[in-house]
Image (cartoon, rainbow, N blue to C red):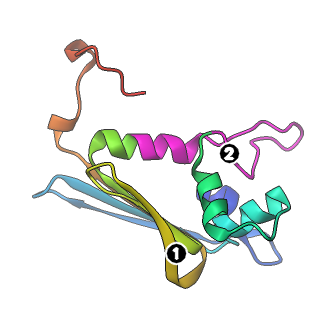
């Protein structure tokens, strides 16, 4: 839904979004990709903050912060969003998965060791591409009855 909200393109404001996924049963990995052909994260942030001189990487970092969003969930009242990317990043870290987001001139990659790398793309991309790898092996999950006392969030 986030991709549809942000991936508005063209004069007709029609969402240009595609997605695909693959489950690798041998490795117990689910790989998902969501791609939108909207204006892109950096462009949306610069417009929202009214700061066209902001460095692209700084705009991208702003979008990754908890509570930061260029959209609202309401047509009549501004109900803030900005939890989606933060929750996705936390989930990927807990899951020991990986996440790559590329948009405009920037990318972020989080690997299974929870290392986050933000940088510039060699070739800019209009829109946003999100690649997620999720571990589906039950060794990465606990049932409520198996509570170890650790809190992930």
What mark, if any, has residue 39 been given in the picture?
Answer: none
Residue at the (17%, 37%) spot, across then down: 138
Can residue 25 be found in the magenta stretch? no
Identify the image quadrant of residue 32. bottom left
Q: Which of the two discs, 2 and 1, labels the residue nearer the N terminus?
A: 2
Furthest residue in direction right, as rendered: 76
| Residue 76, image x, y percentages | 89, 39
**Magenta span dominant secondary structure:** loop
User: Which residue was labeled with disc 2?
Assistant: 68
Q: Left or right of 77: which side holds 21?
A: left
Furthest residue in direction left, as rendered: 26
User: Which residue was labeled with disc 1?
Assistant: 120
Q: CA distance from mark 2 to mark 1?
A: 21 Å
| Residue 55, image x, y percentages | 68, 69
| Residue 125, image x, y percentages | 57, 80
Can residue 88 be found in the magenta stretch? yes
**Image mark count:** 2
Q: Residues within 10 Å of mark 2 (few under 14, many from 20)?
A: some
In-front residue for pair 16/128: 128
| Residue 126, image x, y percentages | 63, 78
Residue at the (65%, 43%) spot, across then down: 82
Residue at the (36%, 46%) spot, across then down: 92
Part of the protein shown in magenta: 67-90
Furthest residue in direction bottom, as rendered: 123
Q: Is residue 64 above or below residue 31?
A: above
Quadrant housing the C terminus: top left
Q: Secondary structure at mark 2?
A: loop
Identify the image quadrant of residue 94. top left
Can residue 1 be seen from the camera position used here? no
Residue at the (32%, 48%) spot, across then down: 114
Q: Secondary structure at mark 1?
A: strand
């Amino acid at each position: 839904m986030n991709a549809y909200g942000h991936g508005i393109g063209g004069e007709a404001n029609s969402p240009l979004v595609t997605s695909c996924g693959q489950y690798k049963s041998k490795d117990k990995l689910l790989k998902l990709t969501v791609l939108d052909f909207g204006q892109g994260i950096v462009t949306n942030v610069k417009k929202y903050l009214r700061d066209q001189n902001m460095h692209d990487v700084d705009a991208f970092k702003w979008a990754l912060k908890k509570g930061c969003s260029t959209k609202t969930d309401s047509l009549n009242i501004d109900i803030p969003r900005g939890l989606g990317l933060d929750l996705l990043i936390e989930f990927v870290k807990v899951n020991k998965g990986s996440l790559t987001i590329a948009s405009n001139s920037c990318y972020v990659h989080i690997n299974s060791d929870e290392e986050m790398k933000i940088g510039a793309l060699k070739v800019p991309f209009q829109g946003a591409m999100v690649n997620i790898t999720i571990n589906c092996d039950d060794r990465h999950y606990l049932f409520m009855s198996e509570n170890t006392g650790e809190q992930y969030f």
